[in-house]
Image (cartoon, grey):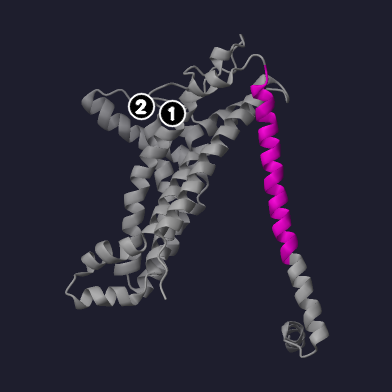
């Protein structure tokens, strides 16, 4: 055992021979450069594959690109192929409905958790609570979907349908949004807490010296100082909700409709991709290419969100010496 440790220490130890050191540095630099190039090539490959099929879809005579983005009827699997059947707005509305509700759940809970972990919890308590909170991110999304069907939806039916007579679909957007909101709480809380912990201690001490309470320091000093990181956490969390697949596929249903009622069944962009992918749509067919068209639309939406996040981060970034 000691011999192995000595070999490892001698391998990783610094050597005074400049030739050996330079050779090692070149090997490390080439390896890291290769990792970066590989990541770029993979990203380019994904984009080329996605948009090449999407462009082929829009070039079909049965598809009208204007109707695709403005139409309110989405029936790509209908027996009669018509441009009127390819209106993606119901999928976009279902996706945004779930994203907005899940964000309304995750943002306040995540920010509150981050404030507690950063400003109120002791180091020992934080070391226990933060890993427990982040465990929520490790639960498979399929489990969240069935949790929505078996737990949240029956409660909604019991409270709203049986008590107030409000109809609740077995598959509904609200149940899916609740579990998606629970899923993104750890992301919002963790990123926000890291941003608040990066605020210098001197700002807190100055506020305490002026007589501010802990709550005032947290909400009027720390949160504004970490605003760029917090907003980025919000946007990243919403992007995660927009791209969620299995939980919404199981809990929200597969009914593309133009509705703002969260108690109705809806279909999101990701759940449609899953529906067609599991079907018999052959490669190169209009049904198969519709997957790539919807995927490209979803890619552009999340890409724009990431750009907005980067702009906000640059605009409100605080640099402390």
Q: If the image is split into quadrants, where does the C terminus sit?
A: bottom left
The residue lying at 71 percent from left, 48 percent from top is: 42
When asked about the image quadrant of residue 198, the answer is bottom left
Q: Position of residue 185 (x, y in %)?
A: 40, 51
- Magenta extent: 32-60
Q: Residue furthest top?
A: 80
Q: Label 1's element?
A: helix
Q: Position of residue 188 (x, y in %)?
A: 41, 54
Q: Position of residue 142 (x, y in %)?
A: 52, 41
The residue lying at 35 percent from left, 67 percent from top is: 118
Position of 116 with respect to 179 (left or right) is: left
Question: Do residues under tags 1 and 2 come within 8 Å of each other at their CB atoms?
Answer: yes
Q: Residue furthest front?
A: 315
Looking at the rendered structure, which numbered label has been put on residue 93? 1
Question: Is residue 58 placed above or below 39 in the rendered structure?
Answer: above
Question: Is residue 21 placed above or below 196 in the rendered structure?
Answer: below
User: Which residue is at the front of the view, 117 or 72?
Assistant: 72
Q: What residue does disc 2 label?
A: 260
Q: How many marks?
A: 2
- Is residue 278 visible in the rendered structure shown here? no
**Label whose residue precedes the other's in the sequence (1 or 2):** 1
Instruction: For label 1, count other residues whose C-alpha is less than 10 Å away and answer few (under 14), some (14-19) or many (20+).
Output: many
Q: Is residue 69 magenta?
A: no
Q: Is residue 54 magenta?
A: yes
Q: Position of residue 24 (x, y in %)?
A: 78, 77
């Amino acid at each position: 055992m000691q011999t192995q440790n000595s070999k490892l220490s001698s391998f990783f130890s610094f050597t005074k021979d400049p030739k050996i050191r330079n050779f090692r540095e070149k090997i490390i630099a080439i390896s890291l450069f290769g990792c970066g190039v590989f990541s770029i090539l993979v990203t380019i490959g994904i984009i080329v594959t996605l948009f090449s099929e999407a462009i082929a879809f829009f070039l079909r005579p049965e598809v009208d690109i204007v109707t695709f983005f403005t139409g309110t009827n989405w029936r790509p699997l209908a027996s009669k192929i018509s441009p009127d059947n390819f209106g993606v707005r119901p999928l976009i509305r279902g996706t945004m409905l779930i994203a907005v509700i899940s964000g309304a759940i995750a943002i306040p809970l995540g920010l509150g958790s981050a404030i507690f972990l950063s400003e109120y919890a002791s180091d020992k308590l934080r070391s226990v609570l933060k890993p427990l909170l982040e465990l929520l991110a490790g639960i498979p999304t399929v489990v969240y979907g069935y949790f929505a069907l078996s737990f949240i939806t029956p409660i909604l039916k019991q409270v709203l349908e049986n008590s107030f007579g409000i109809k609740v679909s077995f598959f509904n957007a609200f149940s899916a949004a609740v579990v998606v909101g629970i899923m993104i709480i750890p992301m919002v809380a963790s990123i926000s807490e890291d941003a608040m912990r990066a605020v210098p201690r001197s700002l807190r001490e100055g506020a305490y010296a002026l007589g501010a309470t802990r709550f005032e320091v947290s909400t009027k000093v720390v949160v504004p100082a970490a605003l760029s990181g917090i907003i980025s956490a919000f946007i990243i969390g919403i992007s995660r909700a927009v791209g969620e697949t299995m939980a919404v596929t199981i809990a929200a249903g597969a009914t593309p409709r133009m509705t703002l009622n969260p108690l109705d069944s809806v279909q999101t962009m990701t759940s449609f991709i899953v529906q067609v992918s599991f079907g018999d749509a052959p490669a190169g067919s209009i049904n198969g290419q519709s997957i790539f068209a919807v995927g490209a639309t979803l890619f552009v939406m999340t890409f724009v969100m990431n750009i907005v996040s980067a702009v906000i981060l640059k605009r409100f970034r605080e640099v402390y010496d």
